[in-house]
């Protein structure tokens, strides 16, 4: 499956005049990925891991991961790291919710504590932003 091609099609829907049709197409593209989501191995998920670090793609990946069940353990750390360095506080929940849903609050908090020492997390004040957002991630 060519994830870059699907992502490009997803981006094009933002330019559609018919927003309802655009939304339906976005859902269809996300479903196309989730129904054939790769096995939970880092090498199979490398596109998603890399995309969580790219400004444009990370939103798309977050929306895909929200629909993936079970959430792959191989993406747990990278998804939480994306939350911890996210500059938009209201978007942090997009990354947190699938992790909390699959692994529980306790595991998420433990991993956040482990990642809290990373320079990029400290620079973005990630722990306090994520801790606040975590309060709203009831599953």
Image: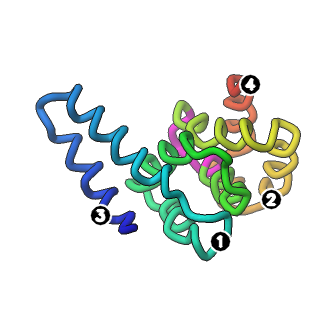
The mark that comes first in sequence, 2 or 1, is: 1
Q: Is residue 5 left or right of residue 15?
A: right
Mark on residue 98?
Answer: none
Q: Pick whichever, 47 or 129, lies toward us.
A: 47
Based on the picture, tell me whether residue 85 belongs to the magenta stretch. yes
Q: Marks 4 and 3, Cα distance to the nearest angstrom?
A: 36 Å
How far apart are the alpha carbons under marks 1 and 3? 21 Å
Helix, strand or loop at mark 4: loop
> In whole angstroms, how far apart are the C-alphas of marks 4 and 1?
29 Å
Badge 4 or badge 3: first in the primary sequence? 3
The C terminus sits in image quarter: top right
Q: Please tell me the numbered disc located at residue 5.
A: 3
What residue does disc 1 label?
42
Mark 4 or 3, closer to the camera? 3
**Left or right of residue 38: residue 18:** left
Disc 4 designates what residue?
Answer: 135
């Amino acid at each position: 499956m060519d994830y870059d091609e699907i992502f490009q099609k997803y981006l094009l829907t933002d330019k559609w005049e018919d927003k309802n049709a655009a939304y339906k197409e976005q859902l269809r593209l996300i479903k196309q990925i989730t129904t054939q989501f790769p096995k939970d191995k880092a090498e199979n998920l490398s596109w998603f891991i890399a995309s969580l670090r790219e400004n444009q793609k990370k939103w798309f990946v977050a929306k895909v991961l929200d629909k993936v069940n079970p959430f792959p353990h191989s993406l747990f750390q990278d998804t939480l790291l994306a939350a911890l360095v996210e500059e938009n506080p209201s978007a942090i929940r997009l990354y947190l919710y699938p992790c909390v849903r699959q692994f529980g609050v306790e595991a998420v908090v433990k991993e956040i504590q482990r990642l809290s020492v990373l320079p990029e997390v400290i620079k973005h004040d990630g722990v306090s932003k994520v801790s606040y957002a975590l309060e709203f991630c009831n599953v």
